[in-house]
Amino acid sequence: MNIGLVVNPHKLGAAKFLSGFVSWFVSEGHKPLVLAGLDLRVRAKRLAPSRLVREADLVVALGGDGTLLLAARLVGRSEKPIMGINLGGLGFLTEFSGAEAREGIRAFAQGRHTEEHRMVLECRYDTKRGFALNDCALNMGPAGRVIEVIAQAAGTFVNRFVGDGVVVATPTGSTAYSLAAGGPVVYPTMQAMLLTPLAPHALAARPLILPPETKLELSLAQGSDTAVLNLDGQRRWRIAVGRPIRITQAGFSVRLVTPQKKSYYSILRNKMKWSGSQV
């Protein structure tokens, strides 16, 4: 099996873990592939991103959630399965711990793994086109001044949000920026679109959960300052007044390999430090 590795080499202990991990799965008969240009001290075939994705049977993201989001962007429409191994802190997306990684690889190689299909957003602005597994966040620009965002759904006016901006999230991204802004936690395999205002200048402005087929359009009101659109924190577009951003459900999903013995509720309890008990 060809295993494509997307690694954050700056994570503490990443180099040591990677060395032992690669040695182990080579001994299991698997072939490691790594991105060309990364200074990783492992014996592996180095490939450009597109070729690595094409040749890999499984893409493994070693790091934190940002590393998995990068892997998802590289995989794109190919829908190659992705396994996230958490070498960082919180890690909602990188569900495997370092201790669980080897069993996860074995399960995948033997076809007894579990996986989830996660919704992806497609964002268009002028000639630009991008995708987001977590969210598209429209934030105030470099001047740091309040922006006015007009939201429409399929041509129907929704609201004018005045504040720091808005974040449009998938259920997967409901535990990221949207949650920090007061949005709800949504089960990650659901199909839905979340619209969460950022520091709104109106107490009545509240998050919305919209159907996945919603054709959402965001634009800056006349007189508003410029803004920046962040796609999963990986790409940034400068947004001007009078040019709408169009956000829809993408025509593909991200396949996440998940641990067999973990429930999403246990992940929430662990990551969010919930203190409740069953007895």
Image (spheres, rainbow, N blue to C red):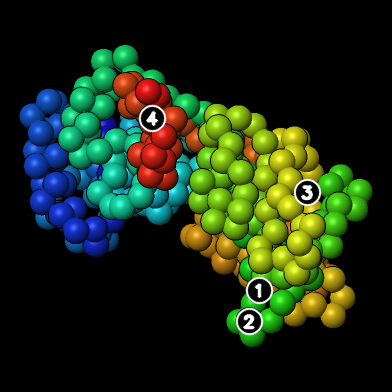
**Real-space CA distance between mark 2 and mark 3, rounded to the nearest whole angstrom:** 25 Å
Instruction: Give residue 277's mark.
Output: 4
Name which residue lies at 31% across and 14% down: 112
Q: Nearer the viewer, residue 175 or 182?
A: 182
**Real-space CA distance between mark 1 and mark 2, rounded to the nearest whole angstrom:** 6 Å
Q: Are marks 1 and 2 in contact (CB under 8 Å)?
A: yes
Most distant residue in the bottom direction = 143
Most distant residue in the front direction = 279
Instruction: Give residue 105's mark.
Output: none
Q: Give the mark nearest the N terminus, 3 or 1.
A: 1
Label 1 CA crowd tier, 10 Å (few <14, some 14–19, many 20+): many
Q: Nearer the viewer, residue 278 or 165?
A: 278
Q: Is residue 218 above or below residue 105?
A: below
Tell me the kind of residue under disc 2: Gly
Tell me the kind of residue under disc 4: Ser
The picture quadrant where one finds residue 98 is top left
Secondary element at tag 4: loop
What residue would you read off at disc 2?
144
**Real-space CA distance between mark 1 and mark 4, rounded to the nearest whole angstrom:** 41 Å
What residue would you read off at disc 1?
140
Q: Quadrant of the N terminus?
A: top left
Tell me the kind of residue under disc 1: Met
